Image: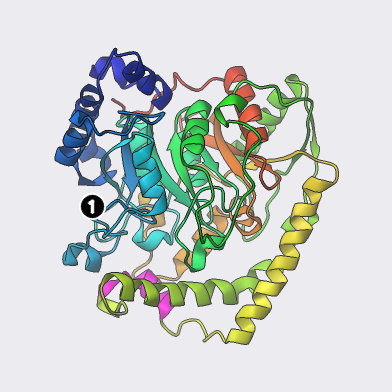
Amino acid sequence: MDSASHDLDACAQAALVQRGEASPRELVEAAIARIEKLNPGLNAVITTLFEEAREAAASPDLPDGPLRGVPFLLKDLGIEQAEQPCYQGNRALRDAGFRSRRDSALGARFRAAGLVTLGKTNTPEFGWTCTTQPLAFGATHNPWDLERTPGGSSGGSAAAVAAGLVPLAHANDGGGSIRIPASYCGLVGLKPTRGRVPVPARLDARIVSDLVVCRSVRDAAAALEAVHGNEPGAPYLALPPERSYCAEVGAEPGRLRIGLLTHPIGMLDAIHPECVAASEGAARALESLGHTVEPAWPDALLDAERGERTMPIAIGELRAGLAIHGNDTLGRPFAEPDVEPFTWAIRAPAYPTVTAEEYLEALEWEQAWVARVVRWWRQDHDLLLTPTVGAPPPTLREMEPPPDEPLATVLRVARQVAFTQPFNLTGQPAISLPLHWTATGLPIGVQLVADIGREDLLLRVAAQLERAQPWADRRPLLHA
């Protein structure tokens, strides 16, 4: 079964179960064998739940959802399934042996889809950086080059899927944490519209979206179809789609007008030639499919004062979130010995105190900026095409915070999220596709951004590109 299943995407594995050609237990045992063999070289899975998975897969009560029996991994951040360890990259939670008290809304929906959770994947502490090398659990290695980062904060999930351990894994994205690991690991990463998929009602709900990283566009569609929908009391709501997301894969998108942006924005001062080449290659592919691609973008994306004007929001929410989170998990606020130097440097007085007035003024400025950005899609264009990240995946050594200057990480993160983070603020759906590889074999993703609520359009165009420039046969150095 291992040789029959490790190359299959989630939809294909689910079809085996539906046709009676494989049992959930067989798929789970094959995935467990792959994790046991390859994870020591990856450090992608930091908590195994093998016995629970075997029991669930063999149970007649395994939900008869669309992905029944498919092996799955949960990112150890932002999602919960009852009684599972939940450490969020933090040593204090690890040492306390903290376990989730209940299923979160999304955790319950993944269960209802029939997915079988085999373990939890590595993440940076509280998901605050774009590399996955927490002090509590050590670095996750990119299967394309073991000296390089798989990205973050969903780097453990991306490394596991890229190496073929499971066909898809949970990921979430508050500034690029689905799309950046997808780019670095040669995967598909769809960030849904704000409110499309339920997230906890907390401070970062306005910017965080959850879904998966996976190897095919149809898997992204199937995952979204399985878990989308409003939750009672949710802070943000999304209008329901007109039809199934799975039906969008293979549907014709029509002739679209697409803007192309390939020069630096935000804190990024240069774009690597390979990332420019990736986006320009995608532009040519889209033109060959009948679409119009031209240099065009929302002018507000180039607004030089955005970082400074919105800094009070980031500082206020990170500090408050850390305090609230400590009370909810440890029963007290986190103290300096509980967290990494980078985390404490943000919490400590390295940054000035943010007043309520400053926080609200920044929110008001940001919302006006959001309106300026989103207006571009309502006028002349259907999609925006950009690099996902401005450079190929850096080495793990490059991403280590300097011990005497932990806040140096802030600038690195700002550069990595230059093309992704704006669309967390606007709430728009965006997808990273693996359409380019460097001469040395490193994957480079490209990003497509649609108007709010238009995941359907992203899936149609992504499927077109997948057929035109297929990536299914590409394999990293370390693979099942």
Give the labeled residue for mark 1: 84
Residue 346 sits inside the magenta stretch: yes
Residue for point 23% across, 69% down = 92
Q: Is residue 288 left or right of residue 418?
A: right
| Rendering coords of residue 170 (x, y %) | 39, 43
Q: Is residue 94 left or right of residue 416?
A: left
**Can residue 338 be spotted in the picture?**
yes
Above or below: residue 86 compared with residue 319:
above
**Can residue 150 be spotted in the picture?**
no
Residue for point 28% across, 64% down = 90
Residue for point 56% across, 57% down = 415
Q: Quadrant of the C terminus?
A: top left
Secondary structure that dominates the magenta span: helix
Question: Which amino acid, by three-letter code, is at mark 1?
Answer: Gln
Residue 340 sits inside the magenta stretch: yes
Q: Secondary structure at mark 1?
A: loop
Q: Which residues are magenta?
A: 338-347
| Rendering coords of residue 460 (x, y %) | 64, 28
Q: Residues within 10 Å of mark 1 (few under 14, many from 20)?
A: many
Quarter-wise, where is residue 475 in the image?
A: top left
Above or below: residue 97 compared with residue 271:
below
Q: Is residue 298 left or right of residue 128?
A: right
| Rendering coords of residue 278 (x, y %) | 62, 33
In this orientation, which residue lies closer to the viewer: 335 or 223? Answer: 223
Please say which color scheme the image uses: rainbow
Q: Quadrant of the N terminus?
A: top left
Query: How many tags in the picture?
Result: 1
| Rendering coords of residue 163 (x, y %) | 33, 31
In this orientation, which residue lies closer to the viewer: 15 or 436? Answer: 15
Above or below: residue 43 compared with residue 310:
above
